[in-house]
Amino acid sequence: MRLPATIPVGARLVVRIALGSDPKDGRPKFRDYVGHVVDWDGQRLILDRDPAANGSRPGERVTLQATDMVALKPVPERRSPRPDPPDFSR
C-alpha cells in the first residue's frame, strides 16, 4: 500500500493492520485502530487510540509499523451526545 509522506498531527484515522493468517481456516486476519496522530515519520505511526465507545477498552498510545499497514483513511470525529434542551418552565 502506498502511504502518504506526511500526516498532520491531530488527524483522526482508522488504520488496518495485517495480523497474518488464521491457523484454523487460513483466512487473513486484521485489526483496526482508530485514533489521533501523534507522530508519523514514514516508517512508524504513533497514534492515541480512542477508547471503545461502549467502554470495554480504554484509550492508549500505540506505535504501528508502516510495513504492517494495509489500509489508512481519515474518519470524522465521534458525535457527542446531544445536551438536554433548556428548561424554560420557571
Image (cartoon, rainbow, N blue to C red):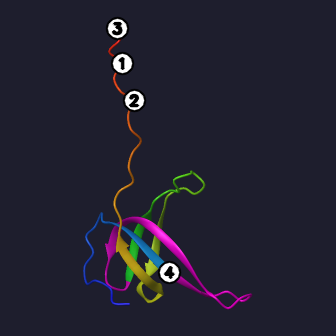
Marks 3 and 1, how far apart at CA: 8 Å
Marks 2 and 4, how far apart at CA: 39 Å
- Sequence-wise, the earlier of marks 2 and 4 is 4
Q: Is 27 covered by the magenta stretch?
A: yes
Q: Are marks 3 and 1 in contact (CB under 8 Å)?
A: yes
For mark 1, what is the residue? Answer: 87
Q: For numbered disc 1, what is the local secondary structure?
A: loop
- Amino acid beneath label 4: Ile
How many other residues sit within 10 Å of disc 1, few (<14), some (14-19) or many (≥20)?
A: few
- Amino acid beneath label 2: Asp
Relative height, residue 79 to residue 87 (above, below)? below
Q: Residue at x 44, y 66 (%)?
A: 34
For mark 3, what is the residue? Answer: 90
Residue 42 sits in which quadrant?
Answer: bottom left
Relative height, residue 54 to residue 67 (above, below)? above
Q: Magenta residues, as a range? A: 17-43
Which numbered disc covers residue 84?
2
* Image location (x, y in percent) of residue 65: 44, 83
- Sequence-wise, the earlier of marks 1 and 4 is 4
Q: Residue at x 32, y 15 (%)?
A: 88
How many other residues sit within 10 Å of disc 4, few (<14), some (14-19) or many (≥20)?
A: many
Q: Residue at x 45, y 85 (%)?
A: 70
* Image location (x, y in percent) of residue 46: 40, 72
Which quadrant holds the C terminus?
top left
Q: Are marks 2 and 4 in contact (CB under 8 Å)?
A: no
